[in-house]
Image: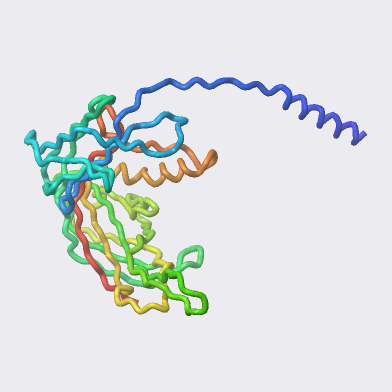
Amino acid sequence: MMRNYIWTGLIGILALMSCEKIIPLELPDRASRLVINSILNPDSLVRIYVYGSQALLAPRGVSVIDNAAIVLSEYGQLIDSIAFDPQSKSYLSRNFHPKPGRFYELIVSAPGFEEVSASCQVPFAVPILHAEAKDSAGIDEYGDYYSQFKVQFTDPEGTKDFYGLVGTVPRTRLRWKSSQPGQPARYDTLYDEVDIYMYSTISPVEDTYDNGVVFTDDLFDGKTYELIINYYPSQWSSNSIKDPRRRQLTLLLNHTDAFYYEYNRKLVKHLRNQNGGLFAGEPVSVPNNITNGYGIFSGYSQTKVEIPLQE
């Protein structure tokens, strides 16, 4: 009797397989649009990346547009000339730095594409009044020890403000160099910075994985506030190399506009779900403020502080 059940099941599976029907999928043929990526910062020259959007099932990659016309204006006044830089594959201003508090408008056109536009305001920097860090602050629920820092600043009055906070620690590594047979191995010592993963138990503070944390002034509008953030120290430094920078944490407090805040909140989640395959999670839409196109045109100002680490 059991053998009959097995054969019946196999016949059923084969019957289902033989009933497979291929249905052609017809997707709408949408015209390619310009994609703009430009974040204005008073500490840097203006850099604008221009791409062409791709069809849904097109191979992955980017289509760089190198023949676009860029018009950047400040309160309607044309500023600087912005030309394509082949090395960075972007459009770069010659000597212009955006100014805090100013409004900027961007218009981009290119052959074969509809003209796009966007505007933004660059916020003023918010000074860091005090900062301190503790290397060994506690042990989390998984048994891993974490570090902690405190940063104090005064939020501007009368406005809705948005922030991002990023931290880095020094990293030292050994890179193997080729050597002749019979000779001792040779290494280069590399010194650089690595981002730290930070998090907070305060609900308005959201971690953005590798891009630090973002938050608004909902809890401290117009007040002086001390923000406490936990973070995991880097595990990628070679302890055999003496590096005086090791006992130091660098913090970057970004005062952003509302759009850049939303963009940072969702970008990494979007990329992780996009690259994670069929079961990576629900799609996360990245905000778009480009009229007739896609992308981001936004601004921020930054305050930097270097903190010695305490035991």
Residue at left offset 50%, top offset 44%: 276
x and y, in percent, of residue 226 in the image: 24, 61
Name above or below for residue 67 compared with residue 310: above
Front position in the image: 202 or 212: 212
In the image, taking residue 121 as reference, residue 54 lies left or right, namely right
In the image, taking residue 91 as reference, residue 137 lies left or right, namely right
In the image, taking residue 94 as reference, residue 254 lies left or right, namely right
Residue at left offset 26%, top offset 37%: 66
x and y, in percent, of residue 4 in the image: 90, 31
Q: Quadrant of the C terminus?
A: bottom left
Name above or below for residue 260 compared with residue 177: above
x and y, in percent, of residue 211 in the image: 34, 53
Residue at left offset 29%, top offset 29%: 293
x and y, in percent, of residue 18 in the image: 73, 24
Q: Quadrant of the N terminus?
A: top right
In the image, taking residue 134 as reference, residue 10 lies left or right, namely right
Front position in the image: 220 or 216: 216
User: Which residue is situated farthest in the right direction here?
Assistant: 1
Q: Is residue 100 visible?
A: no
Name above or below for residue 200 compared with residue 5: below
Front position in the image: 133 or 39: 39
Query: Residue 167's image quarter?
Result: bottom left
Residue at left offset 37%, top offset 72%: 189
